[in-house]
Image (cartoon, coloured by chain):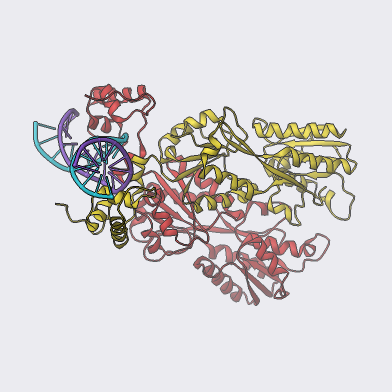
Chain colours: A red, B yellow, C purple, D cyan
Amino acid sequence: MMAPRKSDDQPTIADVAELAGVSRAIASRALSSEPRPVSADKRERVLQAAHQLGYKPNLLARSLTTKTVNLVAVVVNHIHDLSDLDLFDLLISEIQSIGKQVIFVRVGSAERIEEFLRNGIAYHVDAALVFSDFADAATVRKMFRNDRVLMLNGMRDEGAPAIIPDELTGIAAAVADAAGKDVRTAMLVTGRSASPVEQARIGHYKSEIRRHGIELVAELRGDYSYQSGRALAASPAWQKADAVFCTSDAMAMGVLDVHRDAFSENRAREFRLYGFDDVTLAEYEAYPISSIGYDKTVYIKEILGFLTAPDRFQSGGILVQVPTYFVARSSS
Amino acid sequence: MMAPRKSDDQPTIADVAELAGVSRAIASRALSSEPRPVSADKRERVLQAAHQLGYKPNLLARSLTTKTVNLVAVVVNHIHDLSDLDLFDLLISEIQSIGKQVIFVRVGSAERIEEFLRNGIAYHVDAALVFSDFADAATVRKMFRNDRVLMLNGMRDEGAPAIIPDELTGIAAAVADAAGKDVRTAMLVTGRSASPVEQARIGHYKSEIRRHGIELVAELRGDYSYQSGRALAASPAWQKADAVFCTSDAMAMGVLDVHRDAFSENRAREFRLYGFDDVTLAEYEAYPISSIGYDKTVYIKEILGFLTAPDRFQSGGILVQVPTYFVARSSS
DNA sequence: CTGTTAGCGCTTTCAG
DNA sequence: CTGAAAGCGCTAACAG
């Protein structure tokens, strides 16, 4: 004899089964999103009973047996950059549109992040989207219950699937733009060189600069931030050069602000400035920075492909490349 | 006789108990964060065994009985504004620092958000921080398993705890600044007026403007975005006025870009421009917008207070006010 | 197709 | 203080 259910509790599948006059198993099958053997009339009765009761499955309980939580982890160093704004809003929106929820993990400067993850629901996510470069693929994979780890940070070692912008194309176009404008000397303002993405990016700039016979007069290291660009532009290390290539728009903005006089309309431009990311802000008057970007929509579509059909990626460290473009603005 | 545990599985509390030579109940108690009766030596043996095995509790299973998941929902309309960048990174970081994880719920234009929530782990969060104004407190409270709902959107009906910036102070200072500079006519550029925060904000501006004997020549409605500020500034509805008060910095930036000539150093300023939010970007040369802000650190500290000791708030729709300030920049 | 019966891993009565 | 046992709500295995 089943105890009457307390009115302040959510109905459970047992309540639904009872009302429909079937066993819990049948109710479970009828309510499953997967095709399961149930006779048409019982399925109907169950659905009707569930509706009548306002039954909603307890995802926590379901997860305990199915090992799936409909949860995706988005792992980032931080959300700080203008370019993040352009990306994450759309990403979250799209993930939610396929019925999954998003757990944000900010690795930041955190130590013991593995312990942090392991002691929370995040450990059980269905998939992890790793934008942070805090660890390599093998390590990251150990930090989650399953292997659905997508590397979006350039660290595509050991056969982990990855999606990265094909930066060479855009960089080549940017440097070609400079070369076509008689640039002979250039400076490179970089981000954290520990990052493999950044290393590749720097490599591309250097080879393209060399290829066009441009002299690299200095390489200054920042950290992608506006502040660091600004600091470098005002530092003694700053050199004269025909062109300045920054590996982030934010740094280029800092450089621009320090040398703002040099870019006013009524003066001859002292140097040509190139950024990277193509942030929305660069579309407006204040920071008309020539930049390199990629189509966020395409990028995110690929990510969603991974989420919905991971097997397609699973066959051994597939690398998907998203095309980049160069957009010329008045800063160059 | 217990089956040997498979080496590829995580050890369970049963494994720990077995190794320590105690019952599962004892192991559970010894491992609990709450004080539970266990003899010192057994506790020690359990802890030692857990450590040896690298045991980590399965939060999913634990949650099934404890009804707590160590998860906080952050509910937003979207992450789109510059001011979001200044807030959410710190917020996530702080929430994580108390051992909780963050699930981001983007309400956006989504219909059926209730169903979306109910069908995911988000329903089970320990607390919800509601920045979005998609629903009133009573409705929101029904969307989560518990009552720990903190309204950060100004909708503080029905006794729900809320934290809001005390905007009047900052607004009064801004309008006083204008009055002190002989401003006689003003325009108001607003956001979505459906929002109660926005309504209150508009009300404050109007009463302060009136109080200083300034004439309000027009009230233009935007949607907080740069784009809308820009569109309004270029529209036929735009009027001449000594001052323009915008209820977001982003809109003020749009206004500034359209009238950029009017703010160049070598010309007399045509009007004084005031924003709202005090985004970081306004600290730099490109958008030197006088603005109203509040201390994010204080704000977030209050939020964490709610998370760690909700009972302090629980006693009936407590409203915590965070002070705002006015910062004058060259735009005014 | 259907129902019974075990669990998932953990906490918590409830008797000792 | 301790352990056996009963669940949390759901799904899966296994006989019918």
> Can I make out residue B266 in this image?
yes
Above or below residue A46? Residue A283 is below
Picture quarter containing residue A226? bottom right
At x 83% / y 50%, what residue is drawn? Answer: B263
**Image position of B177 with respect to A221: above or below:** above
| Snapshot quadrant of residue A36 | top left
Count up the numbered dots: 0
Determine whether B325 is above or below B133 in the image. Answer: below
Between residue A22 and residue B177, name the one nearer to us: B177
Which residue: 37% across, 29% down? A10
Q: Position of residue B125 (x, y in %)?
A: 45, 40
Is residue B216 something one can see in this rendering?
no
State the residue in front, D4 or A145: D4
Q: x and y percent of residue D6 in the render?
A: 23, 35
Instruction: Describe residue A143's horizontal placement relative to residue A75 as left or right.
Output: left
Point 47% across, 49% down: residue: B100
Residue C6's place in the image compared with A53, above or below, is below
C12 or A276, nearer to the observer: C12
Percent position of residue A160, x then y: 38, 61
Q: Position of residue A260 (x, y in %)?
A: 77, 62
x 27%, y 25%: residue? A3
Q: Is residue D1 left or right of residue A262?
A: left
